[in-house]
Image (spheres, grey):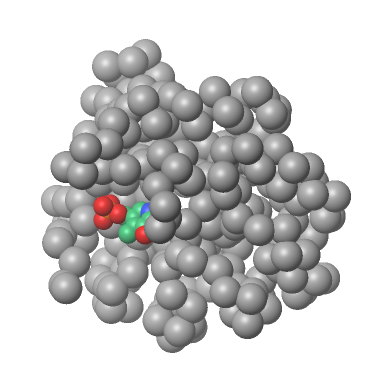
């Protein structure tokens, strides 16, 4: 659902963090002349128990992001069927089948081998699995994601697979506290997408600490955990 619709349905009930986050997104949009209706909010629910997720569901929220397959499956089973589940964590070859069967979106695809496995395992009666190519936008040595130089070829391979629907690029820039410049990294990701596949509809970028910079650079899906649920347990 769009941020605007979410805000309307949240007005009635509890959920201060939810309302504050939606207000933050709205004001980020106003600062750069964008419409909040162009943005989707993905609630990152890793480490959160099912009742915490249900409280967002009760406010009308439907899109949830999980990083670990084992942790996610009981929650997917516990929540109502009309939730949309986004896999945002590291993919492993032996988990691709369960991801393809249980999720609607994957934000963390970075190899052609995993793309083929996801496509082969996607049940025929489900819509195409919506995917993002994760890019190692700051070329960090130990970071997940496809090298910038390999993104175009991987996108082309994914577009040959009818069971997958390529939506755009995703990145997690080096945080400001580690010497990174997320605003510059988001702009580079947006330019990269423009240069290889300008028709793709989405850009998955922005987390709790850097959502304003992501909105300004053209994000369409914000992946937000801490701002919605509070600090994660270690
Ligand atoms: C945990 C996580 C997020 C959310 O991060 P917050 O800082 O808690 O908002 C977003 N994207 C990915 C890939 C994550 O692993």
Image quarter (top left, top right, bottom left or bottom right) of the C terminus = bottom left
Identity of the residue drawn at 44% across and 24% down: 187
Relative to 51, is 198 above or below? above
| Front residue of this view, candidates 153 and 193 | 153
Relative to 213, is 77 above or below? below
| Front residue of this view, candidates 8 and 187 | 187
Q: Could you tell me if residue 128 is visible in this image? A: no
Q: Is residue 171 left or right of residue 127?
A: left
How far from the left and from the top, in percent, is residue 159? 79, 46
Identity of the residue drawn at 83% across and 55% down: 161
> Which image quadrant shows ligand 1?
bottom left
Q: Is residue 222 left or right of residue 84?
A: left
Identity of the residue drawn at 57% across and 49% down: 146
Locate residue 121: give its quadrant.
bottom right
Q: Is residue 189 left or right of residue 53?
A: right
Q: Most extreme residue toward the front, as rendered?
A: 141
| Front residue of this view, candidates 162 and 52 | 162
């Amino acid at each position: 659902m769009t941020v605007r619709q979410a805000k309307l349905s949240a007005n009635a009930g509890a959920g201060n963090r939810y309302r504050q986050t939606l207000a933050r997104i709205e004001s980020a949009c106003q600062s750069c002349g964008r419409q909040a209706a162009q943005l989707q909010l993905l609630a990152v629910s890793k480490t959160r128990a099912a009742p915490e997720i249900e409280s967002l569901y009760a406010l009308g929220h439907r899109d949830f992001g999980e990083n670990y397959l084992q942790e996610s499956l009981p929650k997917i089973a516990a929540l109502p069927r009309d939730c949309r589940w986004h896999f945002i964590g590291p993919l492993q070859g032996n988990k691709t089948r369960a991801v393809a069967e249980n999720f609607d979106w994957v934000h963390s695809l970075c190899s052609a081998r995993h793309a083929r496995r996801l496509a082969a395992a996607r049940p025929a009666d489900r819509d195409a699995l919506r995917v993002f190519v994760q890019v190692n936008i700051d070329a960090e040595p130990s970071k997940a994601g496809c090298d910038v130089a390999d993104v175009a070829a991987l996108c082309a391979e994914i577009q040959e697979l009818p069971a997958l629907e390529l939506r755009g690029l995703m990145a997690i820039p080096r945080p400001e506290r580690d010497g990174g410049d997320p605003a510059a990294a988001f702009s580079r990701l947006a330019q990269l997408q423009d240069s290889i596949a300008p028709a793709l509809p989405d850009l998955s970028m922005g987390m709790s600490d850097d959502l304003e910079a992501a909105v300004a650079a053209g994000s369409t899906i914000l992946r937000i955990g801490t701002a919605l649920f509070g600090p994660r347990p270690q």
